[in-house]
Image: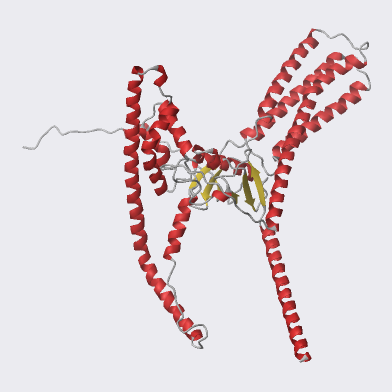
Amino acid sequence: MDTESTYSGYSHYSGRSRGSHRHGERSRDRHKSRSKDSRSEKSVTINTPPAEPLLGDSSLRGEQVQDDNWGETTTAVTGTSEHSLSQEDIVRITKDLEDSVGLDCRRYVTRSVAVILGLLVFFTPLAFLVLPHILWPEKLQSCGTACEGLFISVAFKLLILLLAVWALFFRPARAGLPRVFVFRILLAVLVLLFVISYWLFYSVRILDSQDENYQGIVQYAVSLVDALLFIHYLAVVLLELRQLQPCFSVCVTRATDGETRHYNLGQLSIQRAALAIIEHYYCDFPIHNPALLSASKSRAAKHLAGLKVYNVDGPGNNASAGIAQSQSRAMIAAAARRRDTSHNELYYEEAEHERRVRKRRARLVVAVEEAFTHIKRMQEEEPKKAPGDVMDPREAAQAIFPSMARALQKYLRTTKQQHCHSMESIQQHLAFCITNNLTPKAFLESYLSPGPTLQYGKDHWLGRRWTLISEASVTSGLKDGSVFLLKCVDFSLVVTSRKIPYVQMSEEYIDPKSHKFVLRLQSETSV
């Protein structure tokens, strides 16, 4: 009896040890796979100035992002929700906060260094002119007319340099790039070395010897300002003019729905090309609609549901293992037959959906035209009313909105656009159309066809973070065949670049005399 209890206890302990050992191996495998995945791709982040996620909060993504019954009623729902966070989520949130703080600090440090360098450049020529009057004023020679004319030249050149530097380097930042701009850093280093070399020459040849030729000192300051103007011209060429000539054709594809656009870009680094593509995306691509994608996924899942197979004899029957293989074959054959007829179901389903869309659209057009006709009738009656009874465009929009709200709501539901337009935004757009005397067709254009992302509310496009994923360094220039990804909350943009080919043109001369001909007519006619 004791032996059995001892043996059973030992078996229990050994089984628990093996379970813990297997659990340790699985955890190590997961850790290795995560570390391998993290090493296989390099990702950096582009931060845009606003601080709201693209397409709203991630918890609101899906088919139903907001209340869809604003056309019938408005209901306020309150409640509580519980969220659980794992240790990995906490680590990820902490890392995101550290990255955002680091990017903000880097932006302020960069701006501070630029201001300090600009002040050093601006006050160096002035210091060259002032120090001799402070240190050895009694030894300086008198400044003649030519020297005084150089003062005017220095003053205007410094003013021009100040305005040029402000226009080129102190513009509002469009985005926070993950890496430094190489050309800008090179120009800053060049200016710093240039100013230091001028200070060294000034301290050795002028300060130590206390040069008495003040006109020569002024000419030395003028030469510094001239050189700084030439460096600024070099900065304009490298930062602005170099990228104007198109060199690459990039293809931008949205991974979720395959929407594609093509753009021509100049000689840019990968991160600056990514910034240009994001700016084009907001203006050219139609808004990303995850509801349409979820509808197609549900339709595909319904077609691939297949058939259910039940084991009547139960799991304990010995023949169940042999029957399983035959059941799987029958299941595959049934699924194949079902797949052969699924295209008919898809065809009729899409035809029915198009019919419903046309029907909802016709009702919406009629409702909006009737509402705008009522507005015109009200405008004709306004001169006859008392001053206190005249409505402003906002009140007029609220008065006629209920007549079209139900038709508009049904159309937006059918086309899966209900999350893109709120009741408040629709009323604002209606008031805008009334104020500017737009037609019903102009009002409906925003709802009948999806527009660019910037046409919608800020909660749909005001994204905070884009992640740039590239195998090559993001500071390297675009090359033929370069591929990188731009990831956002709900989707990603796949970018491929192709170099614009060299075009060889030849000229062919055609002698103008070769086009001349003579028409000879016979005077005799046949009888």
| Residue 477 shows in the view | no
Identified at 74% across, 39% down, the residue is: 105
Tell me which colouring the rendered structure shows: secondary structure
Please name whichever residue, 69 or 92, is drawn nearer the observer in this view of the structure.
Answer: 69
Q: Position of residue 80 (x, y in %)?
A: 59, 50
Q: Is residue 147 above or below residue 196?
A: above
| Quadrant into which the N terminus falls | bottom right
Q: Position of residue 170 (x, y in %)?
A: 68, 29
Please name whichever residue, 377 or 62, is drawn nearer the observer in this view of the structure.
Answer: 377
Q: Is residue 131 above or below residue 299?
A: above
Q: How many marks?
A: 0
Q: Position of residue 262 (x, y in %)?
A: 50, 45
| Quadrant into which the C terminus falls | top left
Q: Is residue 490 left or right of residue 125?
A: left
| Residue 213 shows in the view | yes
Please name whichever residue, 463 or 263, is drawn nearer the observer in this view of the structure.
Answer: 463
Q: Is residue 336 above or below residue 93?
A: below
Q: Quadrant of residue 140?
A: top right
Q: Quadrant of residue 100?
A: top right
Q: Position of residue 200 (x, y in %)?
A: 87, 28
Q: Is residue 335 left or right of residue 481?
A: left
Identified at 66% across, 26% down, the residue is: 167
Q: Is residue 52 left or right of residue 36?
A: left
Identified at 48% across, 82% down, the residue is: 324
Q: Is residue 229 left or right of residue 461?
A: right
